Amino acid sequence: MPEVLKAPLVVEFPFTRSLGPVQSAFLTGLRECVVLGVRTGDGRVLVPPVEYDPVTAEEIRDLVEVAPTGTVTTWAWNHAPRRGQPLDTPFAWVLVKLDGSDTALLHALDAPGPDAVHTGMRVRVRWAAERSGAITDIACFEPADGKAAEVAEPAGHTGEFEDAVTGIVAHARLDYTYSPGRAQSAYIAALSGRRTVGERCPSCRKVYVPPRGACPTCGVATSEQVEVGPAGTVTTFCIVNIKAKNLDIEVPYVYAHIALDGADLALHGRIGGVPYDQVRMGLRVEPVWTEGGRYPDHYRPTGEPDADYETYKELL
């Protein structure tokens, strides 16, 4: 039985965004241990607040302080917390309708076990020891018993703060294990021999690289292997001016879609061996391999005349 290929992969990037006046007030409020919602034209209070009424699409700016206590409307137990989640011990994901709000806020509930959680239970905010103006300023919710379960009267904050939070950086990360399947395993195995192999559709006869195991146009399985390239044609490209983290390539550089000879689908690769401002559509290129490399490091010009537009226009 052939070996099943698999590899751990991580997709990670910081997402930076600016904040409008409503989101700015909400996050600044969390920093100051104040929970703010926004009132719609028909009197509903939304938490978390939004800048446009989801029903009427009207702009809404009327900020309202709500209580840090509330009621669980629904929940699910998380028995195995993952990296970056609010708590490192088992907890419940809960939707909490804060007192004074007409909508529910999603967050974590610190509870000893699923038997301790139920719809309708009273909870309160547990504030983080250090706060910066983020949803994580609410460390979690915790059960509220006795007097702590009573509705906390908000002070009626106006939503105006000094040194307001005007932007946030959200660190997005996805950890997963990738298994390429039969078609792409054959493609990867061929690359180890510095060959590029695609698969031909038995219906439309198009050759797809990398192969997918099925034709995306006809929806039928593919199995006929076809070696393509090694040379190809630049169909489209972009000039990269921002240096990527952990990527030792000086900017600017060019990333391009390259239609390998014999393929009916362009793959992407970096263009080297030529000044970035001399890369063009139709440029003929060939792969450059490094010692021990599992795929081409980049593509460089072959010195051939540029390909005629008619020969690759369908691959743009």
Image (cartoon, helix red, strand yellow):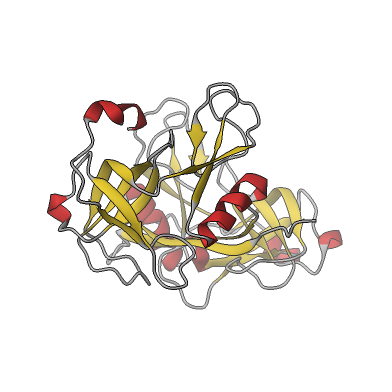
Q: How many marks overall?
A: 0
Q: Is residue 158 visible?
A: no
Rendered position, 59 above or below 185: above
- In depth, the one of 50 and 85 nearer the eye is 85
Rendering coords of residue 190 (x, y %): 55, 55
- In depth, the one of 238 and 16 nearer the eye is 238
Image quadrant where residue 312 sits = top left
Image quadrant where residue 218 sits = top right
Which residue is rendered at x = 22% and y = 40% of the image? 281
- In depth, the one of 295 and 146 nearer the eye is 295
Image-based side of 255 in relation to 93, left or right: left
Image-based side of 287 in relation to 36, left or right: left
Rendered position, 131 above or below 220: below
Rendering coords of residue 294 (x, y %): 49, 64
Image quadrant holding the C terminus, namely: top left
Image quadrant where residue 108 sits = bottom right
Image quadrant holding the N terminus, namely: bottom right
Q: Is residue 192 visible?
A: yes
Residue projecting furthest to the bottom: 129
Rendering coords of residue 48 (x, y %): 49, 48
Which residue is rendered at x = 27% and y = 65% of the image? 243
- In depth, the one of 263 and 62 nearer the eye is 263
